[in-house]
Amino acid sequence: MSTWQTASYEDNPFAEAPGNKIDSKTALIRPSEDTSVQPPWLQDQSTVQSIPVVNVEKALDTEIPRMILYTRISNLVLSVLMIVVSLLSLLTTNNATTGVLACYVVVFSCLLCCFETHLKQISKFIAMNFGFMYSAKSRTAFMIFVGTILFSFNLFGKIIGLLMLANAGFNIYI
């Protein structure tokens, strides 16, 4: 017997593998009837173990509402902080321009707060008069606009303005 015939299956892929029989007349390797050594794509589908597939849609369905909730909470918190900063600036300023801007920021932050509460009557009013709040791009532009107005206030106003710009970036991300 030559060394080629006695070589192991790992050394020589043409040698007789476990579960395969060599047909000497046609030189083809024929699979045996035992399907346990066959690759999964050649086995009967009833014997192949299924690989668990992660349902991506289910994972996204639970993650997206959580991100929207975080956005709504951050919008509400920032709108309350903007009202506080604006009222403090309104009470402590001697400049008329800063006072007018503080009044505008109070109105804008009330608009954002009312939009995020999603109360039925208020939502109808906002939809009729401030429809841009229902567009993601327009709402982000609104947040950037209000955030830049906050830079005209004191240090606390600048900090809240930076947080508002970061929140606008978070809204773009979502």
Image (cartoon, helix red, strand yellow):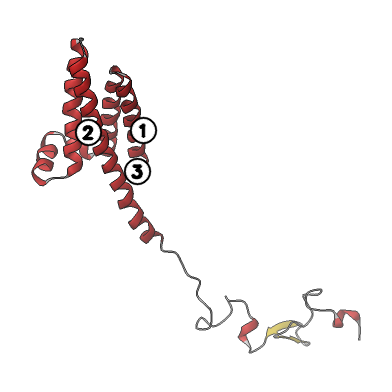
Q: Residue at x 16, y 21 (%)?
A: 103
Q: Name which quarter of the figure residue 18 lies in.
A: bottom right
* Residue designated by label 3: 174
Given residues 45 and 151, the one toward you in this image is 151
User: What residue does disc 1 label?
Assistant: 166
Q: Residues within 10 Å of mark 3 (few under 14, many from 20)?
A: few
> Quick check: 39 above or below 73?
below
Q: Judging from the image, what secondary structure is the residue with disc 2 in?
A: helix
Amino acid type at mark 3: Ile
Q: Amino acid at mark 2?
A: Val
Q: Which badge, 2 or 1, comes first in the chain's sequence?
A: 2
Q: Which mark is residue 93?
A: none
**Depth check, front residue: 88 or 1:** 88
Question: The C terminus lies in which quarter of the figure?
Answer: top left
User: What's the amino acid at mark 1?
Assistant: Ala
Which residue does the numbered mark 2 point to in the structure image? 80
Q: Are marks 2 and 1 in contact (CB under 8 Å)?
A: no
Q: Is residue 108 left or right of residue 173?
A: left
Q: Mark 2 or 3, which is nearer the eye?
A: 2
Sequence order check, earlier mark of 2 and 3: 2
Q: Position of residue 170 (x, y in %)?
A: 36, 38
